[in-house]
Amino acid sequence: MSQLTLRMITRLTRLASNHRPARHQLFSTSARRPLMSTTGFTETQLTVREAVAQVCSEFPNTYWQEHDQNEQDPKEFHAAMAKNGWLGIALPESLGGSGLGISEATMMMQTIAESGAGMAGAQSIHANVYATQPLAKFGSTAQLESTIPKIISGQWRVCFGVTEPNAGLDTLRLSTRATKQSDGSYKVTGQKIWITCAQVASKMILLARTTPLEEVKKPSEGLSLFCIDLDRSSPGLELRRIKKMGGRAVDANEVFFDNYSVGVDSLIGEEGQGFKIILHGMNAERCLLAGEALGLGYAALGKAATYARERNVFKRPIGQNQGIAHPLAEVYMKLEAAKLATYHAAQLYDSSKADKTIRQDAVGVACNSAKYLAAEAAFSACERAVLTHGGMGYAVEYDVERYFRECLVPRIAPVSREMILNYISEKILDLPRSY
């Protein structure tokens, strides 16, 4: 471990020590004690958890309620995370990052969601973590030096441009084209959808086809990855915000390209190798989404347990009834099991960078499994939280309705439950491919 990393960890530990509130005040779930067992986590992970929670404590549930209702970007929260250096948690120290791993970044994302910020708070920054992973690994020196420091400082925000309306999960058949020009630049034509934070982003990590599908041997060939400017004053670019069910504080968009000019220096890595490159970010994204789902689930469970202790009906706490207590206990066990799968996947992802005996397909299985299990556990927790609150679960002021609306995100995105089950069936059980 380098001296820079040791100094960074010392700084984080000092930050947590100087600003460490009482444990029961750490999150806005009002739980008497932390619900999640922290046994087995590293000191660095726990330090990240403490320090990030301190930043999050400046943004109470009312902040997130208002931003959700007003569909208002949480720019103050993004700025606070940037100010404290958290946007560079998994980016190289040489570029101003902390040089930590996805294990620590997953803990950061869980802590944000668990604080009451939910998926909206997490989505406001998570592309800065996972979408930059392919850029950090495969980008040129010039790209890194001109882009990464501005992302870490919060000056630039990033979005991820992969999903298309006609291709959906069939990423290899996306139709957005990037056509090379005589001067080495590209013209992009096509459409992306469900692009989070495109309204406020300065950069997009874009996956586009540079060789037509009919001219390649395999569908995975001919795709290229770009780091492009989102210049709204330039011709050929249009953004349309999508009205959505949950996470309304962050924008989701359709993005239209019509011969949109992309600079010669925007290509990440080699032309035609974009799909292989982007996989580096996709597995990281699954870990982060799993962490966010866990945070949401623990927040909902904490709210439910508190309400069950304090709400009295028929002259006794409703939590005294097994019909209330047992489902909450079951949810806790689901979250704890998903937690183990999530941090195993994150640790495997980090270790695979140095340990070449760790196969990438094993990393993929672990990350997809973690995302599935965490999303299902979060859904169970959020649903049970609403039901525990009864009629008040429908009220905005109790937050659980917001959590329930948001818990569908990790079940659907960035890959559906069904596609993960297909993946495990094929890769692990050696069953015939169904699609």
Image: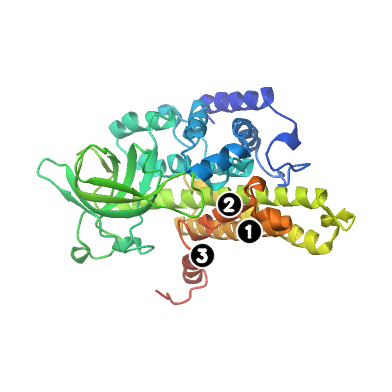
Q: Amino acid at mark 2?
A: Ala
Which residue is labeled 3 in the image?
417
The residue indicated by pointer 2 is 293
Separation of marks 3 and 2 at Cα, in angstroms: 14 Å
- Residue 283 in percent (x, y) is at 46, 52
Disc 1 marks a residue whose amino acid type is: Ala
Instruction: Looking at the image, tell me whether mark 1 or mark 3 is earlier in sequence order.
Output: 1
Element type where label 3 sits in the image? helix
Residue 359 seen by the camera: yes
Alpha carbon separation for disc pair 1 and 2: 8 Å
Q: Amino acid at mark 3?
A: Arg
Q: Nearer the viewer, residue 347 or 80?
A: 80
Residue at image x 29%, y 60%? 174
Q: How is the model colour-coded?
A: rainbow
Local crowd size for mark 3, using a 10 Å CA cut-off: few (<14), some (14–19), many (≥20): many
Q: Residue 163 has which mark?
A: none
Which residue appears at 59% of the width and 60% of the height?
Answer: 373
Label 1 CA crowd tier, 10 Å (few <14, some 14–19, many 20+): many
Cα distance in 3D space between marks 1 and 3? 13 Å
Residue 376: x and y, percent? 60, 61
Say whether marks 1 and 2 touch (CB < 8 Å): yes
Q: Position of residue 399 (x, y in %)?
A: 64, 47
Whether residue 356 can be seen here: no
| Residue toward you, 123 or 100 | 123
Picture quadrant of residue 386: bottom right
Q: Is residue 405 left or right of residue 208?
A: right
Q: Disc number at residue 377? A: 1
Decide if residue 108 is on the left or right side of residue 257: right
User: Upstream in the sequence, badge 3 or badge 2?
Assistant: 2
Looking at the image, residue 282 lies above or below residue 421: above
Q: Between residues 283 and 307, which one lies in front from this camera angle?
A: 307
- Quadrant containing the N terminus is top right
